[in-house]
Amino acid sequence: MTRHKRRRVSTKSMYQWHRYIGVSAALLVILLAITGLMLNHTSELALDKSYVTSPALLHHYGIDPPRASSSFAAGPHWISQWDKQLYLDTAPLGKFSEALTGAVLLQDMLVISLNNSLLIYTRDGELIEKMGAAQGIPTGILAIGTSAENRLLLKSANGMHVADEALLDWQSVAAAAANWSQPSPLPATLNDDLARLARNGRLSVERVVLDLHSGRILGNAGVWIMDTAAILLLFLALSGSWLWLMRLIRNRHRHKKH
Amino acid sequence: MLAQARGVYQSPEDFLQEVFAHRPPPAKVIWLTGEKKQKATEILGHKPDYLRVRYWADENRSAWILEEIGKTEPITVGLVIVEGKIKRLRVLAFRESRGDEVRHDFFTRQFDDVGLKENNRLDRHIDGITGATLSVRALTKLARLALYLDSLRQPQTAAPS
């Protein structure tokens, strides 16, 4: 075989490889391109603020329905904490690293006690004030309740404390009869609604797109698949350049002959 | 090693003890409703996430402990106001990972004797700090809010428009 014929055969073979690899890598390249574009515009697309609700995908990530860490009834309302998230009925009140220790309805205010702070809300769930040590709240709150005179009471490791009417000043008091807020299980329907809500806010769309991009959504195998896609892309770039170069050389030869 | 910016520099209780020579007066509150809430929203650039603000005051001065988010975490600031002017601004707790230069005296001194002009703006320019823009902005907002709230507790002083 002449040198010229050998080059033609190898160019033809390279064309075939370029085509086959291009077709087989197409799907992965499309996936990489789309997810890459999405990740480049995470903020604009609000991917970090959108959450996955598909039970199958959540289960795939090992996010199963959570359980309420604690729940308390306050008049007609229910206060519950799921992981760090606090809910007034089904309305999220925010995330608190302190544990929920009780809740009472006092006139038109809903008072929620955490380990070291008190949260005062309107009945509509609007925060009036968050109070901590700076506002005279004792640390290590064990329970919250109301006295016979309908004054707010706190039980802490250091004893019992009573608040004035405006909840501005706290005084230590001797143990007295009180109606303490007791933990109680949520009604079944509310529990199911909250379990769904609490589960839905755990997996961001950004996480899933990132895992699709890297292949990690399929574990280690997915990473290898994406590695293969990257190598195929590299091959396509090199083979494409080589084929372009060969054609350029061939065309120059033709021009010289003419 | 990267310097750690987070820290609690003074507890609110200690701040009040220091301001009122160990005899802090009873707390009072201002309710942020109606126009007050609207003005506070304009100052902060967002709706305040509380309805009442606590303060401590004697015949000479008022003290405020306020919080505002710098980038993602709240910065706790103690302020003392005398006759409509800031007499002391101190960062009590800083929880962000960077930008804590605002806690230093060279920066907080800029607020000394600052008051409000029209539209609840500070009557003096506060120089920024490169790399701490959001923290500087948070402290400036809190200074404006404290001065505005202080003007509400003094009906004899003309409240800025």
Image (cartoon, coloured by chain):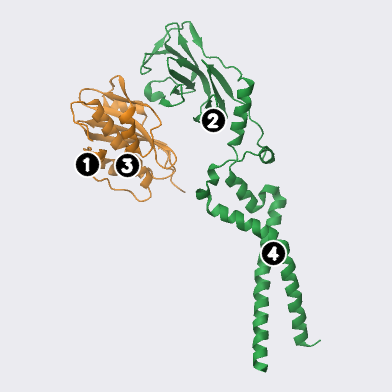
Location of residue B46 by image quarter: top left
Quote the CA–CA distance across marks 2 and 3: 35 Å
Residue placed under numbered mark 4 in the picture: A232
The chain to which mark 2 is attached is: A
Residues under numbered marks 1 and 3 in contact, where contact means CB atoms less than 8 Å apart: no
Q: Is residue A192 left or right of residue A153?
A: right
Residue located at (34% from left, 44% from top): B136
Residue placed under numbered mark 1 in the picture: B123
Percent across and percent down for residue B159 are 22, 32
Location of residue A238 by image quarter: bottom right
The amino acid type, in three-letter code, at marker 1 is: Asp
Percent across and percent down for residue A106 are 44, 15
Q: Colour of chain B?
A: orange
The chain to which mark 3 is attached is: B
Residue placed under numbered mark 2 in the picture: A85
Residue A222's place in the image compared with A188, above or below, is below
The amino acid type, in three-letter code, at marker 4 is: Leu
Category of crowding for the residue at label 3, using alpha-carbon neighbours closer than 10 angstroms: few (below 14), some (14–19), many (at least 20): few
Residue located at (59% from left, 32% from top): A197
Q: Are marks 2 and 1 on the same chain?
A: no
**Nearer to the camera, A232 or B47:** B47
Residue A180's place in the image compared with A232, above or below, is above
The amino acid type, in three-letter code, at marker 3 is: His
Category of crowding for the residue at label 4, using alpha-carbon neighbours closer than 10 angstroms: few (below 14), some (14–19), many (at least 20): many
The amino acid type, in three-letter code, at marker 2 is: Gln
Q: Quadrant of the N terminus of chain A?
A: bottom right
